[in-house]
């Protein structure tokens, strides 16, 4: 269940403490702060104090992904599926179980089921669909363990696919999408429930199980199964379903639902199937990395300096920034320690006091300080709230904490001699990322240097260094050593050449990759798809308040009869929260995959989707999502483990009680929620990277405190993307913010990739112009439209369209004339030709 907000727990604790104080007057007034602090730590959970053992990937475990397909209110339908299968199976096969049949007999029975799917009676068709779903679920009534049910599920799904089940279901799905009677019936109902989407839910469940099972590779797969996987992957990504990829059909279901024309569509299942279809056809994160390396090799670019997936997985989390409560406690400790005179401290040190003895108060370790180092850029003027009073009084720049003195410097007898800075700071051995420099950065550096030393510039020339001093030569050499040319830069350069020289370069050869096919299918209605996904994300966000005009995403989770007991209400509450979390997970993963694949395929495809997301307010939506108690969201336990598939279909379920509802997994975090948070942060990074106007949106929406709270999650990957977002806006937040957040600045230096001449930490960037954001977006939009028109608008007449001036070929073209034309030919000739004057000036005008 979702945790109670910290503020309410804090208020409850205060109320209880105040009552105790009223009954017992002799207690000290400051006494309640201790239980308050303990309560705060308990409310935020153990997530904040320990590293989260979370490994980011394309998906969760197979059992977790399959269990999320079903709502807890659908649990009675497992038995209904089994009954429909057994009723039909017993009429065909006597005294034998499914798992006892040989493959030939199983194929014969499946073929009979597929023939029965073509009946016109809806009830009979639904029973057959349920029987097929039971096969896809692994004939669990004949299995003793979860692993056995998953084994038979995989076996049956490959059989179903090879017999053509997916194609048959696709035809039924298209019929249900166009079923206007079901849509109008749902629109007339005051409340839509689980019963309104029964047929769609059964079909989508079968299709999801087929896609998800075949997508996953296993060592035990036969050559026949491997071949079936490749065939299925090709079919899903090709425009073989009504001339468009299967994913486009699912996108159309999403837009139809969000336009309120089909409120009974089970959106959670549609989104899960859409996400897994895109993941299967286009590939996951590791596939993307391989494609990127291959593409760089084709373009003649140097290989990547590192494998980003491996680097991120090897990073470790930093300590979270100090909260307001910890800062207050620290200030109180500093005030107590401030009463101790310097003379006493000097006397103690002469007596050989151990810095770790009980007499000397221990100083809290610097938060977000992975390498136990002091900020090398902190000077005497900075008085951070997190500093200790003793360090501040010393006035020695870069003095280390007492907790680190035995590692770095042994405490010398006073007065301590000043040592070089390099000896007083413990630097990390190496940074996780290789520095990168863009061609534009080198050009800007040389332009500034030439203006300073020789008084004029040479444009984009990065080779001529005449007249520049020797240190500038060394700087340019260093910059060129770390120069990085991205695939996007090559694509933009090529596109500009095609726009400038269309006749010389001819038509571009476009490789028909699955990504290209999907983009072409999505292009006509791309804005509608993006807006629909963001509407669903907003409706599923935990910070959204229920409104009368908002989209109802609970149509496939609410039962026909609303709960009448407290236990049923608790179960439904958990189910609703879980349902929303799964929707957020599917949408965030889908959007991230689309952005990454489109960016690799062509940068302007990525920019087109990105601009639609920005114009649809995706940036404030994601910030609104994170403007909550993110620790409570990550550690939420909205699951009932005994009701999860496949556990619930194999084991005999005990009677549900309040205690059994609260018994969830023992994990310190919820995998899907942490996965969703990282996905949304990555999307936000992709939207704002190198975009000054969008970075200013982060500043305007006051994202810094929201993002800084997200650093409390001790997970390296999540912290990395938060720090990236903080880095790009640091120079706009002001000097005071940087002074009071030096630990966060230090973490950015340690974890985020360095751009050698990026002035992010000091605010001296000449690009800090908040008034030109519209011009930037308009220029980008113009480039995108030119790209789309050149590539995909084949019907457009341009000035380069060839004109046929040959009389013989024009007169020789075959023209379809009506059958009775020869009867009135002379009249037409007189009216249209002989009686009309020839306007020679119009022939000279260009169209």
Image: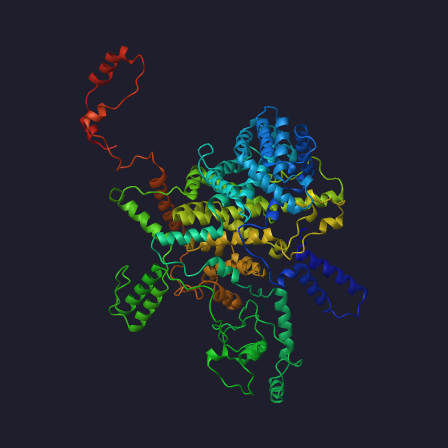
Is residue 27 positioned above or below 252 on the image?
below
158 and 488: which is toward the camera: 158
Question: In the figure, is residue 96 to the left or right of 798?
Answer: right
Task: Pinpoint residue 785: horizontal percent, then vertical percent.
Answer: 37, 43
> Is 444 above or below relative to 208?
below
Q: Residue 97 location in percent, x, y?
A: 67, 36
| Residue located farthest toward the top when viewing the structure as drawn | 823
Q: Please, which colouring scheme is shown?
A: rainbow
- Which residue occupies the foreground of this view, 820 or 650? 650
Residue 404 appears in view: yes
Residue at horizontal 41 percent and vertical 49 percent from the top: 600
Q: Nearest the camera: 744 or 18?
A: 744
To which quarter of the image does residue 108 belong? top right
Total label count?
Answer: 0
The answer to whether residue 579 is visible is: no
The residue under the point 62% across, 30% down is 128
Query: Where does the image place residue 273, in percent across and percent down from the top left?
Result: 55, 41
Q: Quadrant of the C terminus?
A: top left
Q: Nearer the viewer, residue 153 or 453?
A: 153
Residue 487 in the image: x percent, y percent? 37, 53
Looking at the picture, does residue 612 appear above or below residue 22?
above
Position of 21 with respect to 499 (left or right) is right
């Amino acid at each position: 269940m979702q945790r109670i907000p910290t503020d309410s727990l804090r208020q409850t604790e205060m109320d209880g403490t105040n009552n105790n104080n009223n009954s017992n007057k002799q207690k000290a007034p400051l006494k309640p702060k201790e239980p308050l602090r303990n309560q705060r730590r308990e409310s935020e959970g153990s997530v904040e104090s320990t590293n989260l053992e979370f490994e980011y990937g394309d998906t969760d475990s197979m059992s977790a992904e399959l269990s999320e397909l079903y709502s807890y209110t659908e649990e009675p339908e497992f038995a209904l599926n089994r009954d429909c299968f057994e009723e039909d199976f017993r009429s065909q096969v006597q005294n034998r179980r499914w798992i006892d049949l040989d493959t030939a007999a199983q194929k014969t029975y499946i073929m009979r089921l597929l023939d029965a799917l073509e009946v016109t009676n809806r009830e009979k068709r639904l029973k057959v669909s349920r029987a097929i779903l039971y096969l896809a679920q692994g004939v669990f009534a004949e299995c003793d363990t979860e692993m056995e049910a998953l084994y038979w599920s995989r076996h049956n799904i490959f059989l179903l696919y090879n017999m053509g089940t997916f194609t048959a279901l696709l035809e039924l799905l298209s019929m249900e999408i166009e079923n206007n009677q079901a849509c109008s019936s749902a629109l007339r109902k005051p409340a839509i429930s689980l019963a309104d989407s029964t047929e769609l839910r059964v079909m989508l469940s079968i299709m999801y199980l087929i896609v998800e099972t075949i997508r996953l590779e296993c060592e035990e797969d036969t050559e026949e199964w491997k071949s079936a996987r490749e065939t299925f992957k090709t079919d899903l990504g090709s425009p073989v379903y009504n001339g468009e990829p299967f994913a486009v059909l699912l996108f159309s279901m999403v837009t139809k639902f969000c336009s309120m024309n089909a409120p009974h569509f089970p959106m959670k299942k549609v989104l899960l199937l859409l996400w897994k279809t895109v993941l299967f056809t286009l590939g996951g994160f590791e596939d993307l990395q391989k494609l990127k390396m291959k593409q760089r090799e084709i373009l003649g670019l140097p290989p990547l300096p590192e494998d980003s997936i491996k680097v991120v997985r090897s990073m470790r989390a930093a300590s979270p920034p100090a909260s307001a409560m910890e800062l207050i406690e620290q200030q109180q400790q500093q005030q107590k320690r401030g009463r101790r005179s310097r003379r006493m401290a000097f006397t103690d040190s002469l007596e050989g006091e151990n810095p770790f003895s009980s007499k000397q108060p221990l100083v809290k370790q610097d938060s977000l300080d992975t390498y136990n180092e002091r900020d090398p850029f902190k000077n005497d003027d900075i008085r951070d709230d997190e500093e200790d009073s003793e360090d501040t009084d010393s006035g020695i720049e870069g003095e280390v904490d007492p907790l680190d003195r035995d590692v770095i410097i042994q405490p010398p007898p006073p007065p301590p001699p000043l040592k070089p800075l390099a000896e007083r700071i413990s630097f990390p051995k190496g940074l996780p990322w290789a520095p990168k420099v863009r061609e534009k950065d080198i050009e800007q550096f040389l332009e500034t240097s030439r203006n300073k030393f020789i008084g004029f510039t040479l444009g984009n020339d990065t080779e001529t260094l005449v007249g520049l001093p020797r240190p500038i030569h060394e700087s340019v050499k260093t910059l060129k050593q770390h120069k990085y040319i991205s695939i996007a830069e090559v694509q933009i350069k090529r596109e500009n050449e095609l726009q400038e020289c269309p006749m010389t370069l001819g038509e571009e050869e476009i490789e028909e990759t699955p990504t290209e096919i999907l983009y072409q299918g999505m292009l006509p209605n791309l804005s509608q798809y993006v807006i629909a996904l963001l509407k669903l994300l907003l409706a599923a966000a935990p910070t959204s308040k229920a409104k009368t005009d908002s989209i109802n995403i609970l149509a496939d989770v609410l039962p026909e009869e609303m709960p009448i007991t407290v236990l049923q209400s608790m179960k439904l509450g958990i189910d609703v929260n879980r349902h929303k979390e799964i929707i957020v997970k599917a949408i965030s993963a889908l959007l991230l995959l689309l952005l990454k694949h489109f960016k690799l395929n062509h940068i302007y495809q990525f920019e087109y989707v990105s601009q639609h997301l920005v114009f649809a307010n995706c940036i404030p939506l994601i910030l609104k999502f994170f403007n909550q108690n993110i620790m409570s969201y990550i550690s939420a336990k909205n699951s009932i483990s005994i009701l999860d598939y496949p556990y619930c279909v194999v084991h005999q379920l005990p009677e549900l009680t309040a205690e059994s509802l609260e018994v969830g997994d023992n994990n310190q975090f919820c995998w899907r929620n942490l996965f969703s948070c990282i996905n949304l942060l990555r999307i936000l990074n992709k939207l704002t990277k190198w975009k000054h106007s969008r970075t200013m949106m982060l500043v305007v929406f006051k994202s810094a405190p929201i993002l800084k709270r997200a650093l409390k999650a001790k997970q390296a990957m999540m912290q990395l993307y938060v720090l990236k977002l903080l880095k790009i806006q640091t120079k706009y937040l002001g000097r005071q913010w940087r002074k009071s957040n030096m630990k966060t600045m230090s973490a950015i230096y340690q974890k985020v990739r360095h751009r050698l001449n990026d002035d992010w930490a000091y605010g001296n960037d000449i690009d800090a112009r908040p008034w030109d954001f519209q011009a930037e977006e308009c220029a980008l939009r113009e480039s995108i439209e030119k790209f789309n028109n050149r590539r995909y608008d084949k019907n457009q007449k341009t000035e380069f369209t060839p004109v046929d001036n040959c009389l013989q070929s024009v007169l020789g073209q075959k023209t379809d004339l009506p059958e009775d034309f020869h009867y009135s030919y002379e009249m037409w000739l007189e009216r249209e030709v002989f009686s009309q004057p020839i306007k020679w000036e119009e022939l000279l005008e260009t169209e």
